[in-house]
Amino acid sequence: MEPPIIYYPRLEYIETVKSKELDTGNKVSRKSVICGSQNIILGGKTIIQTDCVIRGDLRRTGGGHAVVVAIGRYCLLAKGSIIRPPYKTYKGIFSYYPMKIGDHVSIGEGSIVEAATIGSFVHIGKNCVIGRFAIIKDCCRIEDNTVIPPNTVVPSFSIYDGSPGVFVDELPECVQDIYETRTKDYYSKFQPKD
């Protein structure tokens, strides 16, 4: 079944053109909150919807430019999702650590992500909490309302569900193709309306 065309108000979104920091075709809602944009890398063709929050300002102290949040190509951050880098106190020093999100990742409405790494071809459902320093490998699905505890490693081709999130099933090897097609379709059908 073909997904329908999703129209958004043209004036509500900014579409990026190629620059040093950003690749082409990112669609970012003016109603999202992007803090520390100089520390955020968007890989291209990523959609950041209304009320999303990305905290690129939460970074280690010290001089210089640092990538805090790196988001790959064809990612979707749905309405109200929050992306913030993980943090910990080590030897008495509080520090934030970078977060990397791969390609073809969708993060559902209202989800909060503080992972260290999210691989490519990952679907995170609505209202999920991904704990600090969690690692979600490639080709995974996190069901709606799942809480992944801090420091959890979710293996490739896994489905996790529950609170706390536990392994419930395995995904087929073709899931990479399915998620790639799904994210590209969503991007192509996310169209401006005057």
Image: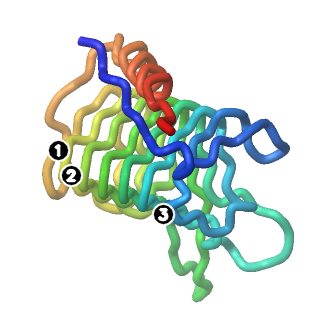
Q: Quadrant of the N terminus?
A: top left
CB atoms at circles 2 and 1 under 8 Å apart? yes
Q: Residue furthest front?
A: 194
Which residue was labeled with disc 2?
146
Residue 127, numbered circle: none
- Comes first in the chain, label 1 or label 3: 3
Q: Residue furthest bottom?
A: 92
Instruction: Judge the density around disc 2: few (<14), some (14-19), many (≥20) Cα neighbours within 10 Å.
Output: many
How far apart are labels 1 and 3 at the CA level? 24 Å
Left or right, residue 20 beside residue 100: right
Q: Looking at numbered disc 1 in the image, what kind of residue is underneath it? A: Asp
Which is nearer the eye, 95 or 102?
102
User: How far apart, in angstroms, are the residues tagged by discs 3 and 2?
Assistant: 20 Å
Any part of residue 49 in sight: yes
- Which circle's residue, 2 or 1, is located before the other in the chain? 2
Residue type highlighted by circle 2: Thr
Q: Residue at x 54, y 43 (%)?
A: 10
Which of these two is toward me, 51 or 72?
A: 51
Q: Image point 58% across, 82% down: which residue?
A: 94
> In the rendered view, would you say 111 is above or below 18?
below
Q: Which residue is mark 3?
A: 53
Q: Which residue is mark 1?
A: 161
- CA gap between label 2 and label 1 equals 5 Å
Residue visible at 30% across and 58% down?
Answer: 110
Packing grade of label 3 (10 A; few <14, some 14-19, many >=20) is many
